[in-house]
Image (tube, rainbow, N blue to C red):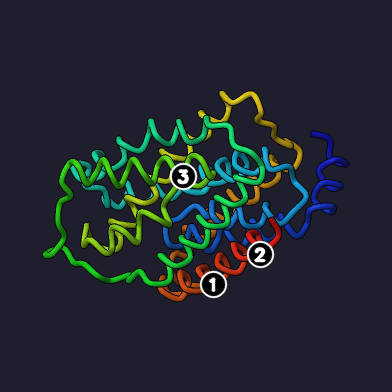
């Protein structure tokens, strides 16, 4: 891409670039990718809705890859608990990403999904379990949680971490840091699966001029967020602030349909 095109694209979309950079920093600081907020931002622009899901998933992948590597280095993964939860989500995230959906239905689904996500983020508690009181989910629960969240995530274009993490906290699945680690891996796997599903859909289109810039920006923001960790805001403050933002955007999307 020519330098002149890069500068022109950045100038024309500076507000999107700035918001994506901020979102990547904030979300990566607590182990999330930011897919719901990327979608919220893109949904309020003139970008074609067929591009929105893929762009958000690509940015998700870039951010949470760094999170997963850091959590793995810190040995935060209990693979016997994480793998069963994640594996059921893969085929359903692919199916959700593959489905062709109409523009109006997409925005209705996106609006309600974001609103529900904002509620779950607001009411969820951060410190609900310790090493001593965590519990194992049974196979049917893994299938239900992972599969249903994976399907919705693939269809809407998010990784699903904002649904999974509150659910795991409420069920005392593990310690907060291990839940964040599990959510990061879940987001990564589902974002890849959902993106593959979308790439097999002939209606997919991507503005690579803008998307390439956004991928670089969220990579930089994600690396900053990973290193700042929780120094910007406490996890509960970040979740509540993000919940308010997502709720307001979801209502605006639904009112504008």
Dot 3 falls on a residue whose secondary structure is: helix
Q: Nearer the viewer, mark 2 or mark 3?
A: 2
Dot 1 falls on a residue whose secondary structure is: helix
143 above or below 25?
Answer: above
103 above or below 112?
Answer: above
- The residue most toward the left is 132
Q: Find the distance from the CA under tag 2 to the CA under tag 3.
A: 21 Å
Q: Nearer the viewer, residue 46 or 82?
A: 46
What residue sits right under mark 3 in the picture?
153
What residue sits right under mark 2 in the picture?
252
Residue 12 place in picture, x, y as percent: 84, 52
The number of callouts visible is 3
Q: Nearer the viewer, residue 183 or 213?
A: 183
**Considering only order in the chain, which callout, 1 or 3, is on the residue closer to the N terminus?**
3
**Considering only order in the chain, which callout, 1 or 2, is on the residue closer to the N terminus?**
1
What residue sits right under mark 1 in the picture?
244
Q: Find the distance from the CA under tag 2 to the CA under tag 1.
A: 12 Å
């Amino acid at each position: 891409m020519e330098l002149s095109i890069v500068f022109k694209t950045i100038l024309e979309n500076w507000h999107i670039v700035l918001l994506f950079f901020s979102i990547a920093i904030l979300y990566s600081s607590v182990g999330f990718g930011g897919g719901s907020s990327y979608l919220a931002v893109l949904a309020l622009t003139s970008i074609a809705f067929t591009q929105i899901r893929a762009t958000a998933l690509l940015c998700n992948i870039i951010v949470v890859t760094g999170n997963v590597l850091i959590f793995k280095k810190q040995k935060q993964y209990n693979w016997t608990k994480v793998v069963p939860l994640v594996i059921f989500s893969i085929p359903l995230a692919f199916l959700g990403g593959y489905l062709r959906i109409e523009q109006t239905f997409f925005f209705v689904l996106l609006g309600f999904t974001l609103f529900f996500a904002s509620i779950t983020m607001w009411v969820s508690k951060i410190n609900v379990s310790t090493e001593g009181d965590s519990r194992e989910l049974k196979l049917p629960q893994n299938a239900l949680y992972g599969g249903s969240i994976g399907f919705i995530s693939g269809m809407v274009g998010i990784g699903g971490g904002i649904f999974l993490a509150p659910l795991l906290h409420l069920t005392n699945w593990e310690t907060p840091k291990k839940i964040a680690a599990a959510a990061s891996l879940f987001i990564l796997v589902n974002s890849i699966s959902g993106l593959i599903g979308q790439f097999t859909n002939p209606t997919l289109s991507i503005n690579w001029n803008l998307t390439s810039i956004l991928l670089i920006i969220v990579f930089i923001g994600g690396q900053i967020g990973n290193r700042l960790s929780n120094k910007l805001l406490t996890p509960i403050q970040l979740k509540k602030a993000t919940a308010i933002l997502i709720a307001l955007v979801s209502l605006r999307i639904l009112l504008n349909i």
